């Protein structure tokens, strides 16, 4: 086994921009890039390996070839690859939406639910997003406001800054606003229930599908319970700092601000490294390679390596 440098499938949703192409170097033949799925074994877009003997194969192929030893014992409780990581460029605002939990999604969609976290990589001045409700409301009022287009009157709009963190548990109403670039770490699911899309038309010239009944079933019509914004304990190390962004049953994520050398090793879980800025060199007996802004690396469980350089890196594992 060796560290896998990954090529991301790129999605050209209508609200996307050009930053993932122009600043992060993602490749696409489309005019815009809304999302880059930088770590994915999902059927709707799988990461392709760029280095070593498995070059040209998918990350799913590597997991199948290497087996459970590549994922680690913490992955044994999951039926399939547990997480999906994206970079999202919202040139325009996304729909108001919600994701179901595992029980509802497995029953109705045949895949996991979706709890996720957002790290704001960058944003325009004055950018804001929707995170839950301003005050608790009932399901009937929720339905009525969807129908009469007054839902946003009761949504919790949050001004955002670079470095802000939001934990979006399943059932939380949310919407990324215009002019925000986000790193999203989530369960391995592509199930989204749109509640409102501001009357926009899709590529076919028709209004995009909404999922009102299912959204009413799963939405927690209340203000967010968790702290958000400029949060996360920062620990100082010889190599720089580590900021804890999220820790839950589905994933743990830190932001490494690297200025030197750090060791990466987890005997119980694979590790994902996503470079947000700067560059570095990965060294281990199995592989040596340079990584830069936009690069994503899958590190198999129990593989010991060092990362040396000056870079901002999102580090995720189980």
Image (spheres, helix red, strand yellow):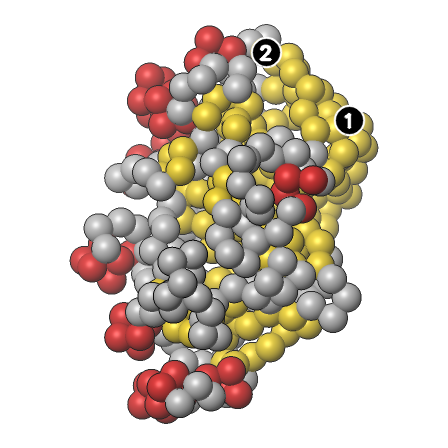
Kindly identify which residue carries mark 2. 287
Quadrant of the image occupied by residue 232: bottom right
Indicate the secondary structure of the residue bearing disc 2. strand
Q: 10 Å neighbourhood of mark 2: few (<14), some, or many (≥20)?
A: some
List the residue tagged with mark 1.
Answer: 309
**In the displayed structure, does residue 240 sit left or right of residue 221?**
right
Which of disc 2 and disc 1 is earlier in sequence?
2
* Residue 103 visible here: no
Residue 7 visible here: yes
Q: Residue furthest front?
A: 205
**Residues tagged 1 and 2 counted as in contact (Cβ below 8 A):** no
**Residue placed at 77% from the left, 26% from the top?**
309
Label 1: few (<14), some or many (≥20) within 10 Å? Answer: many
Corner quadrant of residue 229: bottom right
Residue 233 x/y as whole percent? 68, 54
Residue 209 to residue 13: above or below: below
Determine whether 294 is above or below 106 in the image.
above
Q: Secondary structure at mark 1?
A: strand
Residue 236 in picture, x, y percent from top left: 77, 43
- Tell me: 282 left or right of 142: right
* Rendered position, 200 above or below 277: below
Find the residue positioned furthest to the left.
107
Marks 1/2: CA–CA distance? 16 Å
Q: Nearer the viewer, residue 187 or 59?
A: 59
């Amino acid at each position: 086994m060796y560290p896998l440098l990954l090529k991301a499938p790129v999605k050209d949703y209508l609200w996307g921009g050009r930053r993932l192409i122009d600043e992060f170097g993602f490749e696409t033949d489309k005019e815009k890039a809304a999302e880059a799925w930088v770590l994915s074994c999902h059927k709707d877009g799988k990461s392709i390996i760029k280095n070593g003997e498995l070059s040209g194969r998918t990350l799913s192929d590597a997991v199948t070839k290497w087996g459970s030893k590549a994922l680690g014992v913490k992955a044994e409780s999951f039926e399939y690859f547990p997480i999906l990581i994206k970079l999202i460029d919202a040139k325009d605002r996304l729909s108001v939406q919600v994701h179901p939990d595992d029980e509802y999604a497995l029953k109705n969609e045949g895949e996991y639910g979706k709890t996720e976290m957002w790290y704001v990589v960058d944003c325009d001045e004055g950018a804001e997003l929707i995170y839950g409700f301003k005050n608790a409301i009932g399901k009937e009022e929720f339905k009525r406001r969807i129908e009469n287009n007054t839902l946003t009157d009761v949504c919790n709009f949050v001004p955002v800054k670079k470095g802000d963190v939001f934990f979006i548990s399943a059932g939380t109403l949310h919407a990324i606003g215009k002019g925000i670039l986000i790193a999203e770490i989530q369960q391995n699911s592509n199930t989204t229930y749109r509640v409102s899309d501001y009357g926009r038309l899709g590529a076919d010239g028709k209004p995009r599908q909404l999922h009102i009944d299912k959204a009413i079933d799963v939405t927690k019509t209340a203000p967010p319970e968790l702290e958000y914004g400029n949060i996360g304990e920062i620990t100082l190390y010889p190599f720089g700092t580590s900021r804890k962004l999220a820790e839950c049953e589905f994933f743990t994520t830190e932001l490494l601000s690297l200025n030197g050398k750090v060791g990466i090793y987890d005997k119980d879980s694979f590790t994902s490294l996503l470079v947000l800025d700067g560059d570095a060199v990965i060294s281990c007996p199995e592989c040596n390679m340079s990584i830069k802004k936009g690069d994503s690396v899958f590190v198999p469980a129990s593989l010991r390596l060092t990362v040396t350089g000056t870079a901002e890196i999102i580090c995720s594992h189980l």
